[in-house]
Image (cartoon, rainbow, N blue to C red):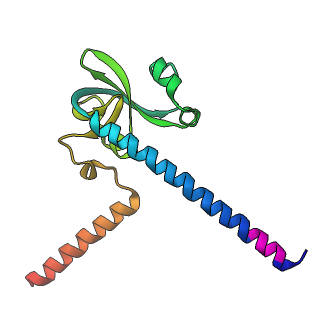
Amino acid sequence: MNVSDIMIIIIVILALLVVGMYYLNKRGMKKMIQAQDFIDQNRTTVQIFVIDKRKEKPSPSNMPKAVFEQMPKSAKMRKTNLVRAKVGPQIVTLMCDKPVYEVIPVKKTIKVDLAGMYIVGITGMNLEDKKKKTLSEKVVTSANRTMKQQSEKKKAK
């Protein structure tokens, strides 16, 4: 075998991988669009009292049994954002995305958009303002604030 033969084989394999990834991504996007349409159709605004929130793997003890059985295997092995809340007279476990999970206050009553047992968003609260900032974001905002104060002092003189 020559070096050029090995290169041709590698290029063909890479091309097949790229084509395969393209079709898998296309199919995944279709599923994601269908899920988003379902969420938008079934969205309701509800007032809940948040009891607890934690990141853990779903299990029959912290999720309804019917929901746990329908979950894909990959979702059962992954840690998810779970929120225990009182919705009306019953206490339920709800799931949510990371940006929503970070701003949900514990031991407070809030209004949320629910789609089944999935928290889509919080109504009446700006998620960006309540989001916890990383150390680098804090440093940048404080530097901008001091620069602005110094420029205002120079203008005043």
Question: Where residue 146 sits: x, y (%)?
Answer: 24, 71
In the image, residue 139 above or below residue 88: below
In the image, residue 7 lies in the stretch drawn in magenta: yes
- Furthest residue to the top? 89
In which quadrant of the rendered image does the C terminus lie? bottom left
Question: Where residue 92 sits: x, y (%)?
Answer: 36, 21
In front: 23, or 72?
23
User: Does residue 97 show up?
Assistant: no
Image point (75%, 69%), residue name: 10
In the image, residue 139 above or below residue 155: above
Image point (20%, 40%), residue name: 123
Q: Which residues are magenta?
A: 5-10
Image point (33%, 35%), residue name: 119
In the image, residue 74 lies in the stretch drawn in magenta: no
User: Does residue 154 show up?
Assistant: yes
- Furthest residue to the left? 156
In front: 130, or 65?
65
Question: Where residue 131 sits: x, y (%)?
Answer: 31, 49
Question: Where residue 106 sits: x, y (%)?
Answer: 31, 32
**Majority SS type along the magenta span:** helix
User: Picture quarter containing residue 40?
Assistant: top left
- Furthest residue to the right? 1
